[in-house]
Image (cartoon, rainbow, N blue to C red):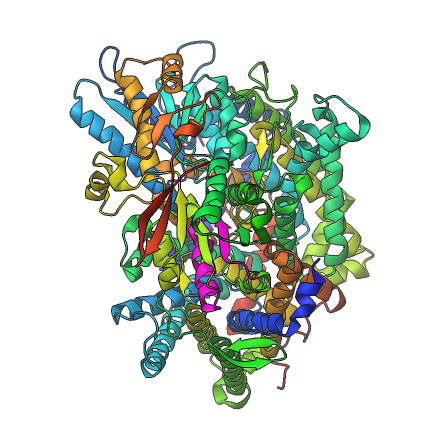
Amino acid sequence: MRRKYVRALGAVGLAAALFAAAGCQASDEGNDAGGDGNCGGKLAIFGAFSGPNSGLVIPSLNGAKLAVRQHNEANADCQVTLQEFDTQGDPTQATPVANQVVGDESFLGVIGGAFSGETKATMDVYEAAGMVMVSPSATAIELTAGDNKAFHRVVGNDATQGAAAAVYFRDVAKAKKVFVINDGTTYGAGIAGELTKALGDLAGGTDQVQEKQVNFAATISKIKAAAPDAVAYGGYTNEAAPLLKQMREAGITATFLGFDGLYDPAFPSGAGAGANGAIVTCPCLPPDKAGGTFSADYEKEYGSPPGSYGAEGFDAAKVLIEGLAEGKTTRKDLLEWVDAYDKEGVSKYLKFDPTGDVDKSRVVIWAYEIKDGAITAQQEIKLS
Amino acid sequence: MNFDALFGNLAQHTVDGLSKGAIYALVALGYTLVYGVLRLINFAHSEIFMVGTFAILGTWSLLGITDTPSIGMAIVYLLIGLLVGAAASGATALTVERVAYRRLRRMNAPPLIFLITAIGVSLVLVEIYALWMAGFFSGRGFSENRLVIGIPAMLKQETVISVAGANITNVQIIMVVSALVMLYGLDQFINRTRYGRGVRAVAQNPDTAALMGVHQDRVIMLVFVLGGLMAGAAALLWNMRYGITKFDIGFVIGLKAFTAAVLGGIGNLRGALLGGLLLGVIEVYAATLTRSTWEDVAAFVVLVVVLIFRPTGLLGESLGKARA
Amino acid sequence: MTEALRQFNERRRHAFGGMADRWRALPRWQRWLGVLAGIAFLYYLPFLGDIPGTNLIIPGLDWFRTDSIAGGSNWAGVLFVCALYVLVAIGLNVVIGLAGLLDLGYVGFYAVGAYSVALFGSTQSPVVQSMQRQFGLSEEWAVAWAVCIPIALAFSLVAGVLLGWPTLRLRGDYLAIVTLGFGEIIRIVAKNSGWAGQAQGVAGIPGPEGPPSADNTVFGLLKIEPWYWLALTVVLLMVLLVRRLEHSRVGRSWLAIREDEDAAAVMGVYPFKFKLWAFAIGAALGGLSGLLFASRSTFIQPETFNVQLSILFVAMVVVGGSGNMAGVALGAFLLAYLPERFRDFSEYRVLAFGLALVLIMLLRPQGLLPSRRRTRELQDRAKEAAVNVA
């Protein structure tokens, strides 16, 4: 009996020793952040970097990483660390992550969230800690409707784009009747609602589809019955590609217009020949207008052109990095820095209004046309 | 509720629903076959279907096919697709049986254990495709593996017949006819051949079948392969009709096909066909009456109502008893 | 190979069984002491590795924390989620492990609980806003958190009975698909109904201290430890409750129904009634867990309550050892904790999860900490199979 106890004790001791070793190793990391003196620091980025929705988010993560790398290579004495926090786009996982980030005093600002849901779930936490958020891709209108001070986004909100699409239908496409479809997500339903409002009596017919749907026979019957000369879709590539494909196969020739959820190389490649002539609006400048070498740099680094929100990821990181480089190395200073930011970015001109949106007068919305499987810039949509 | 939209063109909606249900029916056959023999729900069957869509896509892009080749070539490509899809799905089904289920069968484990194992297998298959294979078959970069992938169109969809206001396209005819042909073939195979007799024997009473000299493992392998073949055929129809695939398409289609199998009477081949077609029609009707978002709710409500009045589905459950 | 594995399993089973026997053989006061020490440790968990009130740390224990890795999540936050899932697992165990009903739509009850507190407790919910208009109340008015608890319990109980009434007469496999459909219906209805906030969800969900605000001192936004302790306390209370139930007449009836429904009916145990009981009790526990989740998150959206979460719940119960409360609690803890601790795998997490499910089921089908009776049932089945083959 006694021998057994001794053996058990020995095992426990050994285990403890092992974990102690492991523990020391683990705690060594993370202390090497930040440069010397009053420059540089640590940023966090969160979003769906793994899991089924990561395809939409990885480009913005890559964009942010690129910005950090470029900065660190150019400024050896002012290093910025970017720590990734994977949430799989799930608010349940994003909340403890937010608590971790605000609880660690060395984090000065956060890039994110990637989706509106996780952003909404965590913005109160960041607000309570006075930590600035710069989101590359959360577009839901209500995110900036409250009195949250911490949240900013470098992406235009759904209202602006909805209004711009209405202008495009009225002035450019000269449409008489527009059929509006949305996918029932916060993003899709929100932006489609804004478009319908802006369209007024041009809006004729509507349907709501759901995520992961592939058969759109019923929707197509409704479109045929309404006989519109344009169709607008609020949602993402996943459903838009098969929908457009089936529309064209069913012989519907109406102009197809989607929003920035479709500004994604997978859209033309998924929809195939049917995508030709489709219009995608995006509050982002064409690469050649953006100036700088972002597009080329990105492609060199990652082997493919920047997908959806790649440029916004870069911009969001850039805004914060420049603040750190200017010596804004407290949370309060960095928040003030972002509030006062006023500069040309890669995706658009970056200046935030008091709600955290990009200054509406500075938002530039472009219409892109799908030509031979590529997204090509068509024209800027002039609001009012 | 927009009844005008529904009854204004009821024939068209019915045709749309039937062609939608044809794929459900073919996938449902896989669930039904396995359930009929083993009394277990092979939840990984949906991924076996997904593997088929990717294998066909991979072969077609290897052959360098572009949109709408000539009719003759299209038929050749479709046949190649059928072979590849059926082979890939059949092989996957067989592997799943061998690796995941056989040991549990030996232990005579309760259904719950099979269920969790199947869910694990299905996660593994999905992730293998999301991480590596999708890029391999589509020739795209790693980071885009999780995005939707387009497939070249084989046939130009054209209206060939108009009946009672419904425009029926060539693809829709192919889909419904192939589902019927596949089911007929399977039905004949199960009811007329020696192998089929073995399947029926094991379905009725495994012990007696073993005593009579039926090799049980071989029958079970056969059943998995047959289910895989049907899923491969469904994958071809899918590629032809929808022209896209993605690593996670299996989940929804599997859910629907399983619902279809239960609706018709799980374990019953004809029930799977009836359930599949019916489910497709219900969904299109519901989407037309309201919005597409409600079609799943309608499908499940109909399922519950049917099960309350006919607890074993519309045609009852019986693979062995059908005409034994 | 398989023979060696079997022997290994056998030995391990003996080892575990031996431990349990030795535990039962201890004098009562020693067992009480052990339980108390265990509970105290659970309350200490958020500080794992630290000694509260001092700057001292216990080396080694740190390693277990999820925030010990770069990009790791807040430890107390993860513990809170673990506690929630343990509560879910205990509830689902009543349905699956005790009554033997396969429920794939448990997330529906979790959602009903979460939506109850969201729709009645938040000033931003369409339901509360329409009540304000209807009764001329101020814009600050909402149902108090404490009142939301019975509302959530009542709604999830009713949901359990409503689902169980027509479907519990169905056999196991049919029940699985019908419950799965039920979970989906709840999600789709919430997503498409204006009164439930649609896809945008509902924000501003209150906690014990009222609506979320930076001024809340105990149950606030930044410190999660109190939330964990709250959830843990609820878990412990529910464990006591379910234990009492398990050893009562109801518990014995469940057992009888699970083992042989027809025999139970002959002996005068009316299966339908007791199945419905199991369903309703399980539903109430799921609802309670959902309520805690919503209160802590302050925001919910319908997409959270998807089928995958339901499947995760079932996996927790089966992996842990269905029928044994300690087992399902362990299963829930591990399935919530391990993916968070081993974030380094990021891209491969789901793959690893799937592989783990398959391996555990193949090598240890009775679960990690099985109930004794369940293990025996499995062995009986295996013996039957052997007879059949021979």
Rendering quarter of residue B187: bottom right
Image check: C91 left or right of B148?
right
Q: Position of residue B202 (x, y in %)?
A: 55, 78
The N terminus of chain C lies in quadrant: bottom left
Question: Is residue A222 at all visible to an observer of this figure?
Answer: yes
Q: Position of residue A352 (x, y in %)?
A: 41, 24
Residue sitting at x 35%, y 45%: A379
Residue sitting at x 25%, y 47%: A304
Residue C136 drawn in magenta? no
Name the one closer to the observer, C263 or A302: A302
Residue A241 drawn in magenta? yes
Residue most extreme to the right: C268
Residue sitting at x 49%, y 38%: A158
Q: Position of residue B251 (x, y in %)?
A: 49, 58
Rendering quarter of residue B120: bottom left
Name the one closer to the observer, C36 or A313: A313
| Residues shaded magenta | A227-252
Image check: A38 left or right of B313?
left
Image position of C257 with respect to B199: above or below: above
Residue sitting at x 27%, y 59%: B139
Name the one closer to the observer, C375 or B44: B44
Q: Position of residue C335 (x, y in %)?
A: 48, 41
